[in-house]
Image: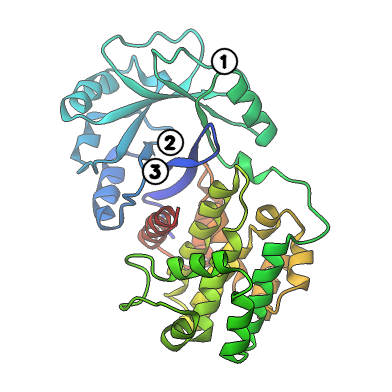
Amino acid sequence: MSQTVLFTREPVVNKKQAITANRLIAHSSDIASITRALNAASEYWPEQLPVFLSLSRLVPTPELMDWQFPSNAYVEIPAQTLKHPLTQALLPLLREKGIEVCLTWYTQGVTLPPDVNWRFILIDGRKHSALSKALGLSLAWGLPDVAAFKQAIADGYDGALGWFFLNALSPAKELAADHAHIIRLLNLVRNKREIHEIENVLKQNVALSCKLLRYINSPGYGPAVEILSFRHAISILGYDRLYKWLSLLLVTTRRDQGAPAMMQAAIARGWLMEQIGAHFFGETDCDNLFITGVFSMLGTLLGTSMQVILDEMLLPKPIIDALLHDQGNYARFLRLARACEGFEPNALIQAANDLQLVPEQVNRAQLVALDFADSLQ
């Protein structure tokens, strides 16, 4: 795959670890290519949350104004480029068009131009203190784990960027009761047991049943008719598709502070894998790819080891091979999805080449996946 423009991403979270924006990093050798790629992807642009556009290590220039800016777009301006004449020419153009800007790579001692309203200022939270809120909201990046995030918030930061929340928990020995209940349902559906038998298990937890029906009826992603009961869901969706929605239910049952961010990340990973898989497989395998992506974060989401979880579940061999051994038909798609989650593009280039994908396919799938995951929050 020849590289033109590739997107990777990071989440932006507030003090409560809820994802409040997405950071899209555009990797290319020139701004003109990035604006063309952004305009080409406008149909798939995620609209649920603000999107920070990072130009990676490029100098922002007036060529960026060729982009048809979505209303939720923020442009990142690296502090090191503030004195560059092309960036200085770009800033008033963004201001005239009402485009929000964020300052990135800030270090202490940088002189900020007085006529720019920085909505957010991204700072290396490992090295520098938060700034006065009069200058903009301070977001910490580079944090290694949840403990570092909590310290950054205590030190005055307003939020953070990155995947630190995936480094949060020590594995538990047993599954929580709600998780075990859903896994029991998943196994019944996988075995295509009698509907009344499955309904009896669902009736033991009415809250989970209502949540499942809400997901199935999500606007734009559910079936054409409203599904009102579990029996109706099976008749409309079939057992295999219903298993997919139950897998969503499994990753959304945690109630601690970091759960929403992990849920969004897991669903985006699974939906991306399904979108890419549609170029290779039929419907059943695509559903299994979604489940593989979502379940790839189950250890962190459920607070236990992947082996403990999979020992309780009846899953197809390709899913188990990908999750436990990084092998089999689905492993390459999981590597691709993971490679989209970071600042550097090298792993993504390799994973896309391995699947013989062009950048447009990867970028489109990633934007669609983000929009879907955000919509379920």
Q: Is residue 102 above or below residue 364?
A: above
- Residue at (67, 63) in percent of width and height: 178
Inter-mark Cα distance, 2 to 3? 6 Å
Q: Is residue 191 above or below residue 267?
A: below
Work out whether mark 1 precedes mark 3 in sequence or the reverse, and give the earlier one.
Answer: 3
Identify the disc placed on residue 56.
2
Report the mark closest to the observer, 1 or 2.
1
Amino acid type, label 1: Ser
Q: Which residue is mark 3?
A: 26
Instruction: Give left or right: position of 119 versus 127.
Output: left
**Residue 163 % position (x, y):** 58, 42
Instruction: Give left or right: position of 71 versus 170.
Output: left
* Residue density around tag 1, few if under 14, some if 14–19, many if 20 or more, within 10 Å: some
Inter-mark Cα distance, 1 to 2? 23 Å
**Residue 315 % position (x, y):** 67, 78
- Residue at (49, 80) in percent of width and height: 230
Q: Is residue 294 above or below residue 262?
A: below
Q: What secondary structure is marked by label 3?
A: strand
